[in-house]
């Protein structure tokens, strides 16, 4: 019975994250739920600008009392991502998983860490329009979220530039990731892994590119 419950928990984490990606927001989503630059759930082949640090607070509902578990589970935290050199991103944050009375064993406050490296990158030379494809590899760890270790490779392609402003005219992303969830010590002897393909787009909503719709259906 415990094994079934744990696998259901992992399934709800994955499904809830995929559902979040279906929504479009008024502004570009800067960081993932674990702190890397990207879409709401998955990282992209983008890193912070030189000399800048992105900071973001997140809250994700991982379960709403429906399904096999019948309990509520959510993840919240504050995260930051910065750039080291030309190609490296380092991210991290403090996060907390909260469960209701039925899921109290999953409650934990702990750290999330991440690193991303651009294998290829778009030109950032002044006066040149962004274009081409960037490819990145990365890995992350969230101790609070069922001790989730993940690794990924992702490609991001800029769709050129808006004529009036020179701003990027949206971007498309496609990647492959593997997640390992280890709940040993919480639910003894329980672990599971999952490979997945993900994709997404960012589309400007005004002529200056100030607002962006973000969407990424599960593949």
Image (cartoon, rainbow, N blue to C red):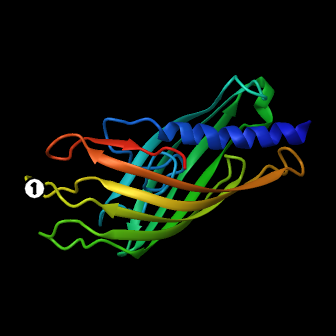
Q: Residue at x 49, y 44 (%)?
A: 217
29 up-or-down from 196: above or below: above
Q: Residues within 10 Å of mark 1 (few under 14, many from 20)?
A: few
Q: Residue at x 68, y 52 (%)?
A: 143
Residue 192: % across, % down:
78, 53
Q: Residue at x 59, y 53 (%)?
A: 112
- In the current view of this chain or complex, which residue is farthest to the right? 1
Horizontal arrangement in the rendering, residue 93 relative to residue 135 (left or right) = right
Q: Quadrant of the N terminus?
A: top right
Horizontal arrangement in the rendering, residue 120 relative to residue 129 (left or right) = right
Residue 59: % across, % down:
52, 35
Residue 87: % across, % down:
39, 74
199 up-or-down from 3: above or below: below
Residue 138: % across, % down:
53, 67
- In the current view of this chain or complex, which residue is farthest to the left? 164
Is any part of residue 43 visible from this angle? yes
- In the current view of this chain or complex, which residue is farthest to the front? 219
Q: Residue at x 55, y 50 (%)?
A: 219
Horizontal arrangement in the rendering, residue 148 relative to residue 157 (left or right) = right
Instruction: Give the total of numbered labels.
Output: 1
Viewer-side residue, 19 vs 26:
19
Residue tagged by mark 1? 163
Q: SS for tag 1?
A: loop
Horizontal arrangement in the rendering, residue 111 relative to residue 20 (left or right) = right
Viewer-side residue, 80 vs 46:
46
Is any part of residue 76 visible from this angle? no
Examine the image and state in which quarter residue 62 appears.
top right
Viewer-side residue, 32 vs 93:
32
């Amino acid at each position: 019975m415990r094994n079934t419950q744990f696998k259901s928990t992992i399934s709800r984490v994955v499904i809830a994250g995929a559902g979040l990606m279906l929504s479009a927001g008024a502004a570009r989503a800067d960081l993932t739920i674990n702190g890397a630059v990207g879409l709401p759930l998955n990282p992209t082949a983008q890193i912070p600008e030189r000399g800048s640090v992105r900071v973001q607070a997140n809250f994700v509902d991982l379960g709403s009392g429906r399904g096999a578990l019948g309990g509520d589970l959510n993840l919240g935290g504050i995260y930051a991502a910065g750039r080291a050199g030309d190609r490296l991103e380092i991210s991290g944050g403090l996060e907390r998983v909260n469960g209701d009375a039925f899921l109290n064993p999953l409650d934990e406050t702990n750290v999330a860490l991440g690193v991303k490296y651009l294998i290829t990158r778009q030109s950032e030379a002044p006066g040149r329009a962004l274009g081409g494809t960037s490819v990145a590899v990365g890995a992350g760890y969230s101790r609070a979220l069922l001790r989730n270790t993940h690794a990924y490779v992702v490609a991001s392609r800029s769709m050129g530039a808006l004529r009036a402003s020179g701003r990027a005219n949206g971007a498309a992303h496609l990647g492959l990731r593997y997640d390992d969830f280890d709940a040993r010590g919480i639910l003894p002897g329980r672990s599971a892994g999952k490979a997945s393909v993900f994709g997404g787009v960012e589309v400007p909503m005004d002529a200056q590119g100030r607002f962006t719709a973000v969407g990424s259906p599960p593949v």
